[in-house]
Image (tube, grey):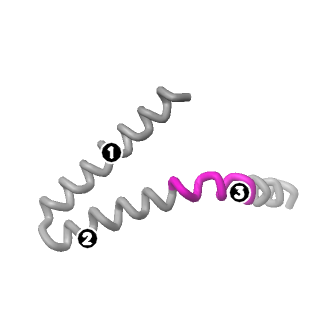
Amino acid sequence: MEKVKKCLNWFAKNIPKAAPDLLALAGGYLIAQGAWMIYPPAGMIVGGLIVIAAAVIVGRAGESG
């Protein structure tokens, strides 16, 4: 039972830190999925652009820190 409490406490502390990243990931997925529903190759293109944009943003954040 103690392990369950420790696990729940860990999640309670760390989920708020990860929430913006999880929401951004979900949003990117939904945008790509919507483009896929219109035209399948567009979904792949949009998904790739989102991944490239995320890589650039993360890379620039690492340079300033």
Tell me the SS state at disc 2.
helix
Crowding near the residue tagged with mark 2, few <14, some 14–19, many ≥20 C-alpha atoms within 10 Å: some
Q: Is residue 46 above or below residue 36?
A: above
The part of the image, by quadrant, that contains residue 25 is bottom left
Labelled disc at residue 6: none
Between disc 2 and disc 1, the foreground one is 1
Camera-side mark, 2 or 3: 2
Classify mark 3: residues with Cα within 10 Å, few (<14), some (14-19) or many (20+): few
- The residue under label 3 is which amino acid type? Phe
User: Which residue range is magenta in the image?
Assistant: 12-21
Q: Quadrant of the rendered structure where residue 24 is?
A: bottom left
Q: Main secondary structure of the magenta part?
A: helix
Give the structural element (helix, strand or loop) at label 1.
helix
Which quadrant: the C terminus? Answer: top right
Q: In this figure, which residue is indicated by the disc labeled 3?
A: 11
Q: Are marks 2 and 1 in contact (CB under 8 Å)?
A: no
Point 42% across, 33% down: residue:
59
| Above or below: residue 56 compared with residue 65 | below
Count numbered badges in the picture.
Answer: 3
Residue 16, x across and y down, in percent:
66, 58
Q: Residues within 10 Å of mark 1 (few under 14, many from 20)?
A: few
Query: Quadrant of residue 36 in the image?
Result: bottom left
Distance from Cα at disc 3 to Cα at disc 1? 28 Å
Q: Residue 1 in the image: state x and y as whole percent.
A: 85, 61
**Discs 3/1, front:** 1
